[in-house]
């Protein structure tokens, strides 16, 4: 027949095991959050790099295109009108690059570990349900 000491040791062991499992679960959730944040940061970095490349290359290309366009148009239009047409063409060409950059930045934002937060909620609900039984 089990004694009070045996029952206390059994309960103590169970409590220690539950604490160890909870600790391991918390560590895994932190690891999941870290991995998710790294993935989102990489996506944001890629988007920022795309924006920078778009801006630099776009500026150089537009400068040359605008110069060539303005030079060609100045043969048939006043110089101011030729420059205005060239600037409008520049804006039309920049729009798709800006849309691509915005899409890449939105993919990584907000930098919140959504999967880890959801997993923590599910785990907390499961623990509450088990404790209530």
Image (tube, grey):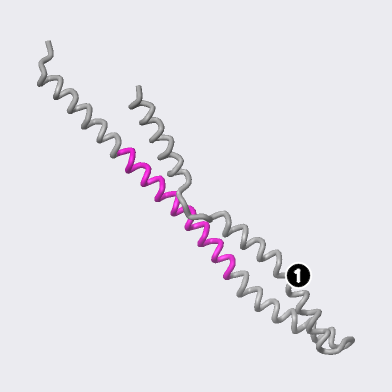
Q: Residue at x 78, y 84 (%)?
A: 83
The quadrant of the picture occupied by the N terminus is top left
Q: Which residue is mark 1?
A: 92
- Quick one: quadrant of the C terminus? top left
Q: Which residues are magenta?
A: 24-52
Describe residue 124's horizontal placement relative to residue 97 as left or right. Answer: left
Left or right relative to 16: residue 32: right
Front in this rendered view, residue 60 or 2: 2
Give the quarter of the image for residue 50.
Answer: bottom right
Q: Is residue 128 above or below residue 24?
A: above
Q: Residue at x 83, y 85 (%)?
A: 81
Residue 73 lies in what quarter of the image? bottom right
- Judged left or right of residue 55, residue 80 is right
**Is 112 above or below relative to 71?**
above
Residue 27 in magenta?
A: yes
In the displayed structure, does residue 92 sit left or right of residue 43? right
- State the image coordinates of residue 114 (x, y, percent, origin top left): 48, 46
Q: In the picture, residue 78 is in which quadrant?
A: bottom right
Find numbered disc 1 in the image and state the secondary structure of the residue it sits on.
helix
Image location (x, y in percent) of residue 125: 41, 33
Q: Residues within 10 Å of mark 1 (few under 14, many from 20)?
A: few
Indicate the position of residue 129 as horizontal and vertical percent values. Answer: 38, 27
Kindly identify the residue that appears in the image at 35 percent across and 25 percent down: 132
Residue occupying the far right of the picture: 76
Main SS of the magenta part reads helix
Task: Estimate the x, y position of residue 98 in percent, counting from the top left.
Answer: 66, 65
Q: Residue furthest front?
A: 132
């Amino acid at each position: 027949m089990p004694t009070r000491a045996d029952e206390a040791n059994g309960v103590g062991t169970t409590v220690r095991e539950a604490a160890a499992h909870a600790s391991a679960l918390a560590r895994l959730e932190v690891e999941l959050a870290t991995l998710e944040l790294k993935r989102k940061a990489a996506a944001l970095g890629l988007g920022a790099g795309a924006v920078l490349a778009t801006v630099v290359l776009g500026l150089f290309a537009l400068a040359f295109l605008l110069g060539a366009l303005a030079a060609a148009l100045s043969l048939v239009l006043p110089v101011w009108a030729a420059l205005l047409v060239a600037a409008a063409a520049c804006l039309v060409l920049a729009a798709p690059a800006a849309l691509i950059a915005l899409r890449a930045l939105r993919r990584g934002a907000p930098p919140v570990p959504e999967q880890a937060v959801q997993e923590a909620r599910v785990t907390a609900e499961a623990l509450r349900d088990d404790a209530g039984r």
